[in-house]
Image (tube, grey):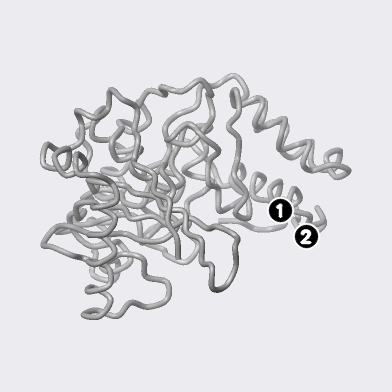
């Protein structure tokens, strides 16, 4: 197996926002760091076998190593958060991407990554939601609202108005794994969306055009892109931060509400609705229908909002 390595390269003026000890470690040549990560991962796997879906190991108290296909948007987002806000999250320490060629199986290269980061405080909402009181859920929702307000102010240093936190196309699981953009602005994103609906656009236009008109001239805001019960962290009944920033970037104001995974968790649903009260279920539903049609489904599969009886 052969490897090519790529160093983590955040915008040059962000280097000062990486912790000092991390900067010392980043001064070590990449092949040496990569060898250390491979050894640590091998030992950690032997001591603590992972489930197939697990990509993270705790390697030291408060330090985690993430391995697999990890987009550079995640470390960039953590650095931007550290630089422009006082919000809590994991802190990136290193990010090394390697292009692997498994000559025993196939000559097609594939990319894997090691992401070294600090632990986020607390536990996921998923782990503790059954223990939370209604008052605590309300408090977390209002705290998340303040968190998002501050997060949304992170300035965009890139030439594209709508892009991921590393200035590239944005990972959007709602869109079936396809990247979005980058785009010049929200209007160009909406134009791309309706073009993808093709022959179904005349049917969908009365449903989504009012939403497009409402946001076309708005500025994008920095968004997490995957609010969910496994990405919202809680400590002692209070919000302690957000994790997993691979889907982050500058998107329309409705993005976090639209992309939130709240259908399987009543606590998460209540928290997100408290945190983002300015957006309504109708917009979420119609945008969801538009994406479904864009992905090849018939508009008939999406009845009107009233017929669907969406809460």
Q: Secondary structure at mark 2?
A: helix
The answer to whether the residue labelled 2 contacts the one labelled 1, judged by CB atoms less than 8 Å apart, is yes
Question: Which residue occupies the foreground of this view, 246 or 14?
Answer: 14
Q: Position of residue 246 (x, y in %)?
A: 42, 48
**What number is the disc on residue 292?**
1
How far apart marks 2 and 1 lie (CA) works out to: 9 Å
Question: Which residue occupies the foreground of this view, 198 or 264?
Answer: 198
Q: Which of the 4 image quarters holds residue 282?
A: top right
Residue placed at 60% from the left, 35% from the top?
181
Q: Position of residue 21 (x, y in %)?
A: 11, 42
Label 2 Cα neighbours within 10 Å, binned few <14 / some 14-19 / many ≥20: few
Q: Earlier in the sequence, mark 2 or mark 1?
A: 1
Label 1 Cα neighbours within 10 Å, binned few <14 / some 14-19 / many ≥20: some
177 lies left or right of 293: left
Task: Quarter of the image for the N terminus: give it.
Answer: bottom left
Q: Position of residue 76 (x, y in %)?
A: 35, 38
Please name the residue that numbered disc 2 is placed on. Answer: 301
Q: Position of residue 212 (x, y in %)?
A: 66, 30
Q: Secondary structure at mark 1?
A: helix
**What number is the disc on residue 49?**
none
272 lies left or right of 191: left
Residue placed at 51% from the left, 61% from the top?
101
191 lies left or right of 157: right
């Amino acid at each position: 197996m052969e490897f090519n390595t790529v160093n983590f390269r955040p915008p040059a003026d962000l280097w000062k926002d990486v912790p000092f000890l991390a900067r010392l470690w980043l001064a070590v040549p990449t092949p040496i760091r990569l060898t250390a990560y491979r050894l640590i991962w091998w030992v950690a796997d032997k001591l603590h076998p992972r489930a197939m879906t697990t990509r993270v190991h705790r390697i030291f108290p408060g330090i985690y190593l993430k391995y697999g296909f990890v987009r550079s948007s995640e470390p960039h987002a953590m650095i931007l958060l550290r630089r422009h806000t006082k919000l809590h999250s994991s802190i990136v320490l290193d990010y090394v991407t390697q292009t692997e060629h498994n000559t025993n199986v196939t000559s097609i290269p594939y990319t894997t990554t090691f992401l070294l980061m600090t632990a986020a405080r607390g536990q996921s909402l998923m782990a503790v939601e059954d223990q939370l009181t209604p008052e605590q859920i309300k408090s977390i929702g209002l705290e998340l609202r303040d968190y998002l307000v501050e997060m949304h102010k992170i300035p965009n240093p890139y030439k594209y108005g709508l892009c991921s936190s590393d200035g590239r196309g944005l990972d959007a699981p709602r869109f079936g794994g396809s990247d979005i953009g980058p785009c010049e602005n929200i209007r160009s994103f909406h134009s791309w969306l309706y073009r993808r609906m093709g022959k179904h656009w005349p049917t969908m236009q009365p449903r989504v055009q009012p939403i497009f008109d409402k946001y076309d001239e708005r500025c994008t805001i920095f968004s997490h892109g995957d609010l969910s019960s496994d990405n919202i962290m809680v400590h002692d009944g209070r919000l302690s931060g957000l994790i997993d920033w691979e889907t982050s970037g500058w998107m329309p104001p409705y993005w976090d509400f639209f992309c939130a995974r709240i259908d399987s968790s009543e606590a998460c649903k209540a928290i997100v609705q408290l945190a983002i009260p300015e957006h309504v279920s109708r917009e979420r539903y119609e945008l969801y229908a538009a994406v479904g049609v864009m992905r090849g489904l018939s508009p008939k599969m999406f009845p009107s909002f009233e017929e669907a009886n969406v809460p």
